[in-house]
Image (tube, rainbow, N blue to C red):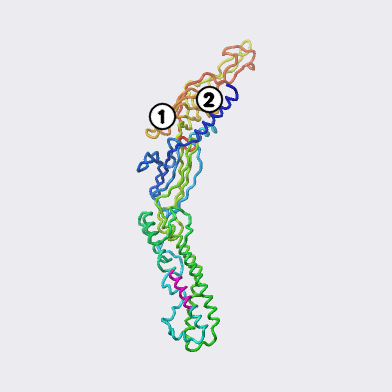
Amino acid sequence: MSTRTRLVVGTALLSSIVTSLHAQDTATAVLELDHGTGVVRLIEAHPGKPADTTTYGQGRTLQLPRPMNLRFRVVNTNTGLYEIRTGTTATASPAIAPVNAFLAKLGPYLPEIGLAISGSPRALGGAKPPPGRPFSDAQLNAAPSAELSSVWERARGAEQALLDVETRISGARGLQETLTLTLSTLEQMRRGAPADAAAAQLRASSGVPATGCTTAKSPDLPRVQGLIGALYALQQARQALDAGLGALPGDVGELWVPVRDTVVAVRGRVVSALGDFEPLVAAAYHVEQIAAITANACAQLDGGVLPISRLTGRTITVSIAPRTEPEINRVASRPAQVITITVVKKPFIRPSIGLSLINLPRAQFDVYGARAAAGGAEVYTASIRDARFAWGATVGTTWKWLDFRETRRIAIWLPELTVSAQPDVKGFGVGSGVSLGPVKLGGGVMWVKRVELSGLRPGQIIPSPQFLATRESYARPLSYWSLSFFGWPGFAAR
C-alpha cells in the first residue's frame, strides 16, 4: 500500500471516529422539571405510545444511555403567574473531566392602578349636564343665528365622542370589564384552577387574542387602539366646538342663552376628559398586558430540542420567578428559584479520581555508605529506608458492564493508575479495585524510586569513600494496596 493510500485511509478512519463521537441517535429524551414539586426527571419518549416511559433518573445531574436529542419542558406550572427563562451551555462529558483533573495533579388583592376608570362614566368630565334640553326642535329651527345651530350640532357630535370614550372604558369588553374578568381569573388560578382551562375561559369571555405560551407581546391591542381612536375623535370634536363657540355673536338672545350654556358645559366635560388622556392610555396598555398574560397562561412550557453527543452534553439553567405586575404578583405564591440541570451521555468508560492511602508491604530499601577498612573503604548497609506507607492520587476506570453503582453502589475498576505524591516515596503503580459508595479498595504493582549501588556490592573494598557510586532506579515492581476516597468535591468521581 502506497503512502498516499495510507494517508487517505487514515484520514477517512479518523473522520469516521470523530463523526461517531459527536453523532446522536434519532430518539428523543425529555428533560422534565416539575415546578410544583421541584423534581427533575429524564425520560425517553417512545413514539406511538400514550405516555413517556423509561425513566433514566431523577436529580440535577442526569445521564443518558446513548447519544440522542433532548427536549426540555416545565410541567405543573402557570406561565400566567410565573415568568420562566431558560439558558443552555455545552458541557464536556464526565469521562473527560476526571482525566484532566488527574493529569493536573499528577397584598390587598385589587390593583392600585390609580386611574379615573372607576365610578360613573359621566364623572370623566366633571359636572353632569343639566337634565333634558331647555328648548324644542322648533325653537332651534327658528334660531335667528345659523352659527348657533352649527355649534349645537358640533356639541351633539362632542357628546357622541364622549359616549364612545365611556364605552371603551366601561362598555362590553371595555377596560373595566376586561380588568374585572382578568382579576377573577387570577383569583381562580390562585385557588388551584388549571391554568389552561382558566385562560381559555378568559379568552372566550374577553376576546383577548391567543398568542400561545410565550412572553412575547401581542401586536393586537384592541382596547388600546379603540381608546386612542375615541380620544382622537374627542380631540377633533373639541377643536370643532372651539371654532363654533368663537363664531357666535356676543348676544345670542335671551331665548338661546340656555343653548349656548349647554354647549359650553359640554366643552368643559370634553376638556376634562382630554385631561385624563395619558392616564387612560397607560391604563389601557396595562390592562391589555395583564389580560394577555393571564389569557395565555399554560400549565406546561415546552422548550427546544438540544443534541446530546458522546462527548458533549448540555447544562440548562431555568429561572422561575413570580411576575412583577402587581395584580399577578399577589397571587403567585411560589418563591423565585434558579435550577441548574446537567444532562450528558452516560460514558462507556467511566473514570474517577480520588485521594489514596498506599501500603507497600515490602518497600524497605537499603541505604548504603562507605566506612574505613584495611586497604581503603568498605561498602556497607548504613540503614534501612522505610517506604511502606505513602499517599497519592488514583485514577480508576470502570466499564459499563462493571458499574453497578446505580443499583448496588458497587463498581469494579480495571485498570487503575496510582501515583505517590509523598516527597520521600516516589512511585507509580498499575492495578485494579472495587468500590462501595465513595470508598475504593485497590491493589496491584508499583514501581518505587530507590537508590542502588552502581557496579558495587556490600562488603566490597574501594580506594576511598569518594569512590562509592550509587544510582536512582525503579527496579522490580512491588505489590501494593490502596484505600481511595472519591466522589468528594475536587475529585470528580462520576
The percent coordinates of residue 452 (x first, y second) are 57, 18
Question: The C terminus is located in which quarter?
Answer: top left
Image quadrant where residue 45 sits: top left
**Classed neighbour count for the residue bearing mark 2: other residues with Cα under 10 Å, few (<14), some (14–19), many (≥20):** many
Residue at point 57%, 24% (across, down): 6
Give the residue type at disc 2: Gly
Question: Magenta span covers which residues?
Answer: 155-167
Q: Whole-Å distance between the Cαs marked 1 and 2?
A: 31 Å
| Residue 491 shows in this picture | no
The percent coordinates of residue 473 (x first, y second) are 57, 20
Tag of residue 401:
1
The residue lying toward the viewer, choosing from 296 and 436, is 296
As helix, strand or loop, the secondary structure at mark 1 comes to: helix
Give the residue type at disc 1: Trp
The residue lying toward the viewer, choosing from 123 and 382, is 123
Magenta-span inclusion, residue 209 = no
Left or right: 373 in relation to 408: right
The percent coordinates of residue 97 (x first, y second) are 51, 35
Q: Nearer the viewer, mark 1 or mark 2?
A: 1
